[in-house]
Each structure stands twice: as structure tokens, then as C-alpha cells.
Amino acid sequence: MLETFIALLFAHALADFVFQTKWMVDHKKKPTTLLTHGAVVLVFSQLAMGRIDSVEIIILAAAHLVIDWVKTRSNQDGLAAYLIDQAAHFATIITLAVVAPQLWSTGWWAAQSASISHAMLLISGFILTTRAGAFAIGKLMDQHSPPADEQDGLPAGGLSIGYLERGLIFVLVIAGQAASIGFLIAAKSILRFGTVNENRAASEYVIIGTLASFGWAILVSLTTVWLQSLLPALEIAPPRP
């Protein structure tokens, strides 16, 4: 069941956060755009699972379309709507993994189950940490007007910083060096000191964004490590002399 869940999670991460363009998001109310996104979900789910003959995967893609259709019709675009949308997608993935756990074992990749599942999980975790986190933090910060000091920064500078810090946190947690995250916090505080020293608005804006970004990255990274611990250990052959 776990391998089935990870494969579907991998497909979801790619379809929703890598191959869904901003244009698709902005025009998802159009039936053709929504169906195109659904086709992307279906194709990646089939490829990740290693099966093209599964009715269950077609039902999953259809459920994904229904969830997205409901979200677009609700005209809600805040953090709560985003989290509810993703929770609904995760619920359908978990449900399918429970109802049809055999999908993975009967697919093309079953012979290389352990190595492929580990790779899919790490890639999914990285995407959800960085890319999905960017959407979540962005929607959170939309509730706050950035101070003048933030508006005068580099174009998309804050976005890039967020990607980098969450990516570094993911790597550190996966490598078992979570304690080093403290150095990232210290380094960012020092670099930001001149900006927020006597500007309360800028200080609060940076603190909210930083804590949210670090919190998201740590939570997703630790969840990835936990799921990884449930998978069969990889058997790595010793190097030849």
C-alpha cells in the first residue's frame, strides 16, 4: 500500500506543482484547460504506477478534476482554500492506496520497487517542500502588505530566497543534519538585520515569512523521513576491491 501511495503522491507533485503552469491556473475555469490538467494528472499517475489499464487511476484523475472544479467555482484563493484543496487531493490518493494497494505490485516498476519508491519519495518531498511551500507561504503573506523595504528588493528575490532556504532544510533533514538548520536561521537573521533593525513592519513581515517557510519545510521534510523509514531498506552492494 505504501508504494502505491508514494507513486500517486509523486504523480500529484509533478502534475500540480511542476507541470501545471501559471497560465493553466489562471484559466482553469475554462473546460478545455481543466481537462488538459486532468489529462496531465492521468498520464503522470499511469506512468508513476506503471499501468495504463487501471480503472482506479482514471477514477482518481476524475476525482482530481472534480476537486479542482469545485475550487475554481468557489472563487476562494487564500491559504485556507489552498490547504483544503490539497487535503482533498491527498485524501483521494490515500483512499485509492487503501482500496487498491495492489496497483503498484502489478505495475511495470514492481521489480525495482525499493529503489524507485525511495527515489519517488525524495523527489516528491523536495517538490512539496520547495514548490508547494512557495504557494502556501505566498498565500499566507498575501494577507500582509509588504513594507517599503521589501517592495524595493530584487524582483522575485524573496521567492528565490524561500526556495533556497526550504531546499537546504530538506537536504539537511534528509542527511540527518537537522541541527544545522539553526545556522540558517542565524545567517538569515544577520543578513536581514540592517533591513529590520528599526522598522517594525519589515521586522514582523520577515519574521512571519521566515517562521512559516521554515515550519513548512521542517514538517514536510520530517514527514518524508518518516515515510522513508517505513519503506524496505535499500540494499547497496559493497564496492569491489
Image (tube, rainbow, N blue to C red):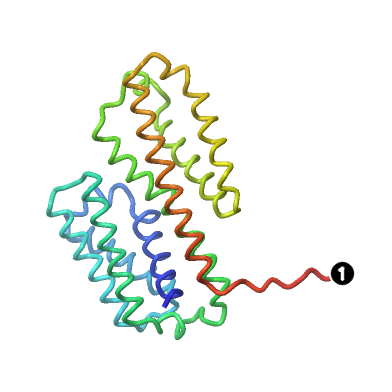
Left or right, residue 65 beside residue 107: left
Residue lying at 49% horizontally and 81% vertically, measured from the top left: 108
* Residue furthest right as drawn: 241
Residue 16 horizontal/vertical position (percent): 34, 57
Residue lying at 22% horizontally and 65% vertically, measured from the top left: 65
Left or right, residue 23 beside residue 115: left
Residue lying at 30% horizontally and 35% vertically, measured from the top left: 141
Of residues 197 and 131, which is closer to you in this image? 197
Tally the marks: 1
Inspect the image, locate mark 1, and give the three-letter code of the amino acid beneath it. Pro
Residue lying at 28% horizontally and 39% vertically, measured from the top left: 140
Of residues 27 and 9, which is closer to you in this image? 9
Residue for badge 1: 241
Disc 1 residue crowd, few under 14, some 14–19, many 20+, Cα 10 Å: few
The N terminus: image quadrant: bottom left
Q: Is residue 217 above or below residue 236?
A: above
Q: Is residue 107 above or below residue 221?
A: below
The C terminus: image quadrant: bottom right
